[in-house]
Image (cartoon, helix red, strand yellow):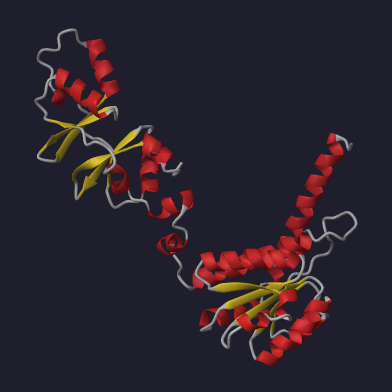
Protein backbone atom coordinates (compact mmCIF):
# COMPACT_ATOMS: atom_id res chain seq x y z
CA UNK A 1 0.00 0.00 0.00
CA UNK A 2 1.36 3.43 -0.93
CA UNK A 3 1.96 6.04 1.74
CA UNK A 4 -0.37 8.96 2.29
CA UNK A 5 2.30 11.32 0.98
CA UNK A 6 2.81 9.43 -2.29
CA UNK A 7 -0.94 9.22 -2.92
CA UNK A 8 -1.35 12.97 -2.40
CA UNK A 9 1.65 13.68 -4.63
CA UNK A 10 0.22 11.52 -7.42
CA UNK A 11 -3.16 13.22 -7.14
CA UNK A 12 -1.68 16.71 -7.17
CA UNK A 13 0.62 15.83 -10.07
CA UNK A 14 -2.34 14.59 -12.13
CA UNK A 15 -4.33 17.77 -11.58
CA UNK A 16 -1.31 19.95 -12.32
CA UNK A 17 -0.59 18.17 -15.60
CA UNK A 18 -4.21 18.35 -16.70
CA UNK A 19 -4.53 22.01 -15.67
CA UNK A 20 -1.40 22.86 -17.63
CA UNK A 21 -2.75 20.99 -20.63
CA UNK A 22 -5.98 22.98 -20.58
CA UNK A 23 -4.10 26.28 -20.27
CA UNK A 24 -1.95 25.16 -23.19
CA UNK A 25 -5.06 25.04 -25.37
CA UNK A 26 -5.58 28.79 -25.11
CA UNK A 27 -3.15 29.47 -27.94
CA UNK A 28 -5.16 27.05 -30.11
CA UNK A 29 -8.32 29.16 -29.98
CA UNK A 30 -7.49 30.48 -33.43
CA UNK A 31 -8.99 31.16 -36.87
CA UNK A 32 -9.99 27.54 -37.37
CA UNK A 33 -11.83 27.61 -34.05
CA UNK A 34 -13.71 30.77 -35.08
CA UNK A 35 -14.53 29.27 -38.48
CA UNK A 36 -15.82 26.11 -36.79
CA UNK A 37 -18.18 28.15 -34.59
CA UNK A 38 -19.47 30.16 -37.54
CA UNK A 39 -19.94 27.09 -39.72
CA UNK A 40 -21.99 25.33 -37.07
CA UNK A 41 -24.08 28.44 -36.41
CA UNK A 42 -24.81 28.92 -40.11
CA UNK A 43 -25.41 25.24 -40.84
CA UNK A 44 -28.92 24.00 -41.59
CA UNK A 45 -27.98 20.54 -40.33
CA UNK A 46 -26.77 18.90 -37.16
CA UNK A 47 -23.35 18.28 -35.63
CA UNK A 48 -22.24 14.65 -35.81
CA UNK A 49 -19.50 13.94 -33.26
CA UNK A 50 -17.47 10.77 -33.63
CA UNK A 51 -14.45 9.08 -32.13
CA UNK A 52 -12.98 5.73 -31.06
CA UNK A 53 -12.06 4.41 -27.60
CA UNK A 54 -11.88 7.06 -24.86
CA UNK A 55 -12.33 9.77 -27.49
CA UNK A 56 -15.74 8.24 -28.25
CA UNK A 57 -16.74 8.72 -24.61
CA UNK A 58 -15.65 12.35 -24.78
CA UNK A 59 -17.63 12.69 -28.02
CA UNK A 60 -20.78 11.53 -26.23
CA UNK A 61 -20.32 14.14 -23.52
CA UNK A 62 -19.77 16.89 -26.08
CA UNK A 63 -22.95 15.82 -27.88
CA UNK A 64 -24.86 16.02 -24.59
CA UNK A 65 -23.50 19.52 -23.94
CA UNK A 66 -24.33 20.67 -27.47
CA UNK A 67 -27.90 19.39 -27.27
CA UNK A 68 -28.53 20.95 -23.88
CA UNK A 69 -27.29 24.36 -25.03
CA UNK A 70 -29.17 24.67 -28.30
CA UNK A 71 -26.91 22.96 -30.86
CA UNK A 72 -28.54 19.81 -32.31
CA UNK A 73 -25.97 17.01 -32.19
CA UNK A 74 -25.71 13.23 -32.63
CA UNK A 75 -23.02 10.79 -31.50
CA UNK A 76 -21.67 8.32 -34.05
CA UNK A 77 -19.13 5.70 -32.98
CA UNK A 78 -16.26 5.63 -35.45
CA UNK A 79 -16.16 1.81 -35.51
CA UNK A 80 -19.89 1.55 -36.21
CA UNK A 81 -19.75 4.29 -38.84
CA UNK A 82 -18.13 2.01 -41.41
CA UNK A 83 -20.68 -0.73 -40.68
CA UNK A 84 -23.82 1.21 -41.55
CA UNK A 85 -23.99 4.19 -39.19
CA UNK A 86 -22.70 6.53 -41.89
CA UNK A 87 -26.31 6.53 -43.01
CA UNK A 88 -27.21 8.87 -40.13
CA UNK A 89 -25.20 11.71 -41.71
CA UNK A 90 -27.37 14.04 -43.77
CA UNK A 91 -26.38 16.49 -46.47
CA UNK A 92 -26.03 19.62 -44.32
CA UNK A 93 -24.51 17.98 -41.24
CA UNK A 94 -21.09 18.96 -39.93
CA UNK A 95 -18.86 16.18 -38.58
CA UNK A 96 -16.45 16.60 -35.66
CA UNK A 97 -13.98 13.73 -35.55
CA UNK A 98 -12.06 13.36 -32.27
CA UNK A 99 -8.75 11.50 -32.04
CA UNK A 100 -5.53 11.95 -30.11
CA UNK A 101 -3.29 10.40 -32.76
CA UNK A 102 -5.48 10.92 -35.81
CA UNK A 103 -3.99 7.70 -37.17
CA UNK A 104 -6.03 4.86 -35.66
CA UNK A 105 -7.22 2.29 -38.24
CA UNK A 106 -10.87 3.23 -37.84
CA UNK A 107 -10.14 6.94 -38.30
CA UNK A 108 -8.00 6.27 -41.36
CA UNK A 109 -10.91 4.42 -42.96
CA UNK A 110 -13.56 6.88 -41.83
CA UNK A 111 -11.91 10.20 -42.74
CA UNK A 112 -11.81 9.65 -46.54
CA UNK A 113 -15.42 8.43 -46.51
CA UNK A 114 -16.51 11.61 -44.77
CA UNK A 115 -14.64 13.69 -47.32
CA UNK A 116 -16.34 11.84 -50.18
CA UNK A 117 -19.77 12.58 -48.74
CA UNK A 118 -19.13 16.31 -49.06
CA UNK A 119 -19.78 17.11 -45.40
CA UNK A 120 -17.53 19.60 -43.64
CA UNK A 121 -15.21 17.71 -41.30
CA UNK A 122 -13.68 19.31 -38.22
CA UNK A 123 -10.82 17.33 -36.71
CA UNK A 124 -10.19 17.60 -32.98
CA UNK A 125 -6.68 16.20 -33.05
CA UNK A 126 -3.59 15.83 -30.87
CA UNK A 127 -1.18 15.24 -33.77
CA UNK A 128 -1.08 17.79 -36.60
CA UNK A 129 0.92 15.52 -38.91
CA UNK A 130 -1.73 12.79 -38.83
CA UNK A 131 -4.02 11.41 -41.52
CA UNK A 132 -7.06 12.98 -39.85
CA UNK A 133 -5.38 16.41 -39.77
CA UNK A 134 -4.62 16.05 -43.49
CA UNK A 135 -8.19 15.15 -44.36
CA UNK A 136 -9.97 17.63 -42.07
CA UNK A 137 -11.36 20.93 -43.38
CA UNK A 138 -10.67 22.59 -40.02
CA UNK A 139 -8.43 21.51 -37.16
CA UNK A 140 -8.96 22.05 -33.44
CA UNK A 141 -5.54 21.33 -31.95
CA UNK A 142 -5.72 19.40 -28.64
CA UNK A 143 -2.05 18.42 -28.43
CA UNK A 144 -0.72 17.60 -24.94
CA UNK A 145 2.87 17.07 -23.82
CA UNK A 146 2.16 13.86 -21.88
CA UNK A 147 -0.55 11.84 -20.22
CA UNK A 148 -1.01 11.99 -16.46
CA UNK A 149 -0.52 8.23 -16.50
CA UNK A 150 3.06 7.57 -15.26
CA UNK A 151 3.61 5.27 -18.25
CA UNK A 152 2.25 7.92 -20.64
CA UNK A 153 -0.28 5.39 -21.91
CA UNK A 154 -3.76 5.73 -20.37
CA UNK A 155 -5.71 8.59 -21.99
CA UNK A 156 -6.02 11.14 -19.19
CA UNK A 157 -4.54 14.53 -20.02
CA UNK A 158 -5.45 14.11 -23.69
CA UNK A 159 -9.13 13.36 -23.00
CA UNK A 160 -9.26 16.25 -20.52
CA UNK A 161 -8.00 18.54 -23.29
CA UNK A 162 -10.61 17.17 -25.71
CA UNK A 163 -13.37 17.71 -23.18
CA UNK A 164 -12.23 21.27 -22.47
CA UNK A 165 -12.05 22.11 -26.18
CA UNK A 166 -15.55 20.72 -26.63
CA UNK A 167 -16.81 22.86 -23.77
CA UNK A 168 -15.16 25.95 -25.26
CA UNK A 169 -16.85 25.24 -28.58
CA UNK A 170 -20.25 24.66 -26.94
CA UNK A 171 -20.09 27.86 -24.91
CA UNK A 172 -19.07 29.93 -27.94
CA UNK A 173 -22.05 28.47 -29.81
CA UNK A 174 -24.27 29.27 -26.83
CA UNK A 175 -23.12 32.90 -26.87
CA UNK A 176 -23.54 33.13 -30.63
CA UNK A 177 -27.14 31.90 -30.36
CA UNK A 178 -27.92 34.29 -27.46
CA UNK A 179 -29.04 31.18 -25.57
CA UNK A 180 -30.55 32.35 -22.27
CA UNK A 181 -31.97 30.93 -19.04
CA UNK A 182 -35.42 30.48 -20.56
CA UNK A 183 -33.96 28.50 -23.47
CA UNK A 184 -31.93 26.40 -21.04
CA UNK A 185 -35.07 25.60 -19.03
CA UNK A 186 -36.78 24.19 -22.14
CA UNK A 187 -34.11 21.52 -22.39
CA UNK A 188 -33.82 20.85 -18.63
CA UNK A 189 -37.40 20.61 -17.33
CA UNK A 190 -36.67 17.76 -14.93
CA UNK A 191 -34.90 17.65 -11.59
CA UNK A 192 -33.74 20.46 -9.35
CA UNK A 193 -31.84 22.17 -12.17
CA UNK A 194 -34.99 22.51 -14.25
CA UNK A 195 -36.99 23.76 -11.29
CA UNK A 196 -34.45 26.50 -10.63
CA UNK A 197 -34.99 27.71 -14.17
CA UNK A 198 -38.77 27.57 -14.49
CA UNK A 199 -40.49 27.17 -11.10
CA UNK A 200 -42.21 30.42 -10.05
CA UNK A 201 -42.99 31.62 -6.55
CA UNK A 202 -46.68 31.62 -7.44
CA UNK A 203 -46.47 27.89 -8.23
CA UNK A 204 -45.36 27.26 -4.65
CA UNK A 205 -47.62 29.77 -2.92
CA UNK A 206 -50.85 28.25 -4.30
CA UNK A 207 -50.00 24.98 -2.54
CA UNK A 208 -50.04 26.68 0.87
CA UNK A 209 -52.78 28.13 2.99
CA UNK A 210 -53.25 31.88 2.76
CA UNK A 211 -53.37 33.05 6.41
CA UNK A 212 -54.75 36.56 6.84
CA UNK A 213 -56.30 38.69 9.49
CA UNK A 214 -57.65 42.20 9.91
CA UNK A 215 -55.62 44.91 11.65
CA UNK A 216 -58.22 45.10 14.46
CA UNK A 217 -58.06 41.38 15.29
CA UNK A 218 -57.28 40.34 18.87
CA UNK A 219 -54.17 38.50 20.01
CA UNK A 220 -56.27 35.37 20.46
CA UNK A 221 -57.48 35.51 16.87
CA UNK A 222 -53.92 36.06 15.65
CA UNK A 223 -52.68 32.98 17.54
CA UNK A 224 -55.55 30.86 16.23
CA UNK A 225 -54.92 31.90 12.63
CA UNK A 226 -51.19 31.16 12.89
CA UNK A 227 -51.87 27.76 14.50
CA UNK A 228 -54.50 26.70 11.96
CA UNK A 229 -52.36 27.40 8.90
CA UNK A 230 -49.08 25.99 10.23
CA UNK A 231 -46.86 28.42 8.36
CA UNK A 232 -45.63 30.21 11.45
CA UNK A 233 -47.07 33.51 10.29
CA UNK A 234 -50.18 35.48 9.42
CA UNK A 235 -50.55 38.46 7.10
CA UNK A 236 -52.41 41.58 8.19
CA UNK A 237 -54.53 42.76 5.26
CA UNK A 238 -57.38 44.99 4.24
CA UNK A 239 -59.03 43.95 0.98
CA UNK A 240 -55.90 42.01 -0.07
CA UNK A 241 -53.68 45.04 0.51
CA UNK A 242 -50.78 44.00 2.73
CA UNK A 243 -50.42 46.07 5.90
CA UNK A 244 -47.89 43.89 7.68
CA UNK A 245 -46.94 40.42 8.87
CA UNK A 246 -46.98 38.71 12.28
CA UNK A 247 -44.81 35.69 12.99
CA UNK A 248 -44.91 33.26 15.88
CA UNK A 249 -41.69 34.94 17.04
CA UNK A 250 -43.55 38.28 17.28
CA UNK A 251 -46.13 36.57 19.49
CA UNK A 252 -43.48 35.19 21.85
CA UNK A 253 -41.75 38.56 22.14
CA UNK A 254 -45.07 40.27 22.84
CA UNK A 255 -45.93 37.80 25.62
CA UNK A 256 -42.58 38.51 27.27
CA UNK A 257 -43.31 42.25 27.35
CA UNK A 258 -47.05 42.35 28.16
CA UNK A 259 -49.20 40.65 30.76
CA UNK A 260 -52.44 42.41 29.81
CA UNK A 261 -53.38 41.51 26.22
CA UNK A 262 -56.87 43.02 26.28
CA UNK A 263 -56.22 46.08 24.14
CA UNK A 264 -53.47 44.70 21.90
CA UNK A 265 -54.48 44.30 18.27
CA UNK A 266 -52.89 42.74 15.21
CA UNK A 267 -51.80 46.16 14.00
CA UNK A 268 -49.78 46.59 17.22
CA UNK A 269 -47.87 43.34 16.65
CA UNK A 270 -47.20 43.41 12.93
CA UNK A 271 -44.03 44.22 11.05
CA UNK A 272 -45.23 46.86 8.59
CA UNK A 273 -42.44 46.19 6.06
CA UNK A 274 -42.43 42.46 5.31
CA UNK A 275 -40.22 41.06 2.58
CA UNK A 276 -42.14 40.16 -0.53
CA UNK A 277 -41.77 38.91 -4.08
CA UNK A 278 -44.05 38.93 -7.14
CA UNK A 279 -45.67 35.60 -8.07
CA UNK A 280 -44.05 35.46 -11.53
CA UNK A 281 -40.52 35.66 -10.12
CA UNK A 282 -38.42 32.49 -10.09
CA UNK A 283 -38.43 30.46 -6.88
CA UNK A 284 -34.64 30.60 -6.84
CA UNK A 285 -34.92 34.38 -6.38
CA UNK A 286 -37.20 33.81 -3.41
CA UNK A 287 -34.48 31.65 -1.88
CA UNK A 288 -31.96 34.46 -2.35
CA UNK A 289 -34.22 36.92 -0.48
CA UNK A 290 -34.84 34.42 2.32
CA UNK A 291 -31.12 33.82 2.76
CA UNK A 292 -30.17 37.50 2.61
CA UNK A 293 -32.70 38.43 5.29
CA UNK A 294 -32.38 35.33 7.49
CA UNK A 295 -36.12 34.62 7.38
CA UNK A 296 -38.13 31.43 6.83
CA UNK A 297 -41.10 32.73 4.86
CA UNK A 298 -41.69 35.28 2.15
CA UNK A 299 -44.87 37.01 1.04
CA UNK A 300 -45.90 36.48 -2.56
CA UNK A 301 -47.79 39.27 -4.27
CA UNK A 302 -49.84 39.69 -7.43
CA UNK A 303 -49.43 43.24 -8.75
CA UNK A 304 -48.61 44.26 -5.18
CA UNK A 305 -51.63 42.57 -3.56
CA UNK A 306 -51.49 39.58 -1.24
CA UNK A 307 -51.29 36.31 -3.19
CA UNK A 308 -49.80 33.84 -0.73
CA UNK A 309 -46.70 32.69 1.16
CA UNK A 310 -43.57 30.76 0.22
CA UNK A 311 -41.88 28.97 3.10
CA UNK A 312 -38.29 27.78 3.27
CA UNK A 313 -39.64 24.23 3.57
CA UNK A 314 -41.33 24.59 0.17
CA UNK A 315 -37.97 25.31 -1.45
CA UNK A 316 -36.38 22.38 0.34
CA UNK A 317 -39.18 20.05 -0.73
CA UNK A 318 -38.84 21.08 -4.38
CA UNK A 319 -35.07 20.56 -4.33
CA UNK A 320 -34.33 24.24 -5.00
CA UNK A 321 -31.84 24.26 -2.12
Q: Position of residue 80 (x, y in %)?
A: 72, 75
Quadrant hosting residue 254? top left
Q: Is residue 58 left or right of residue 174?
A: right
Q: Position of residue 240 (x, y in %)?
A: 13, 41
Nearer the observer, 78 or 304: 78
Compared to residue 107, the image places residue 69 above or below, namely above
- Find the residue positioned furthest to the top: 259
Nearer the observer, 34 or 299: 299
Compared to residue 31, the image places residue 248 above or below, namely above
Q: Is residue 211 left or right of residue 298?
A: left
Compared to residue 151, the image places residue 4 above or below, namely above
- Find the residue positioned furthest to the front: 84
Question: What residue is rendered at 74% in x and 67% in y?
Answer: 55
**Residue 103 visible somewhere in the drawing:** no
Q: Position of residue 184 (x, y in %)?
A: 46, 62
Q: Is residue 150 left or right of residue 294?
A: right
Nearer the observer, 18 or 66: 66
**Residue 125 visible somewhere in the drawing:** yes
Question: What residue is rendered at 60% in x and 68% in y?
Answer: 63
Question: What residue is rendered at 11% in x and 30% in y?
Answer: 214
| Number of numbered discs visible in the structure rendering | 0
Q: Position of residue 261 (x, y in %)?
A: 15, 12
Where does the N terminus fall, quadrant-wise?
top right
Question: What residue is rendered at 21% in x and 36% in y?
Answer: 210
Amino acid sequence: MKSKKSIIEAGVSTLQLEAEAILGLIKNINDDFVKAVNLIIESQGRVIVTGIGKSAIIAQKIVATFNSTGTPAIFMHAADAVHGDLGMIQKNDIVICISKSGNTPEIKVLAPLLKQSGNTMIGMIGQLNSELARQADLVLNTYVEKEACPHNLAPTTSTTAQLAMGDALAICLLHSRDFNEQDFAKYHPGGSLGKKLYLRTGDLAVKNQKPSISPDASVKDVIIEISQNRLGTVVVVEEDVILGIITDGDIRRMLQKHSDLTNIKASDLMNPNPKRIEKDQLAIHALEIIKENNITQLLVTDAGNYFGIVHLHDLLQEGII
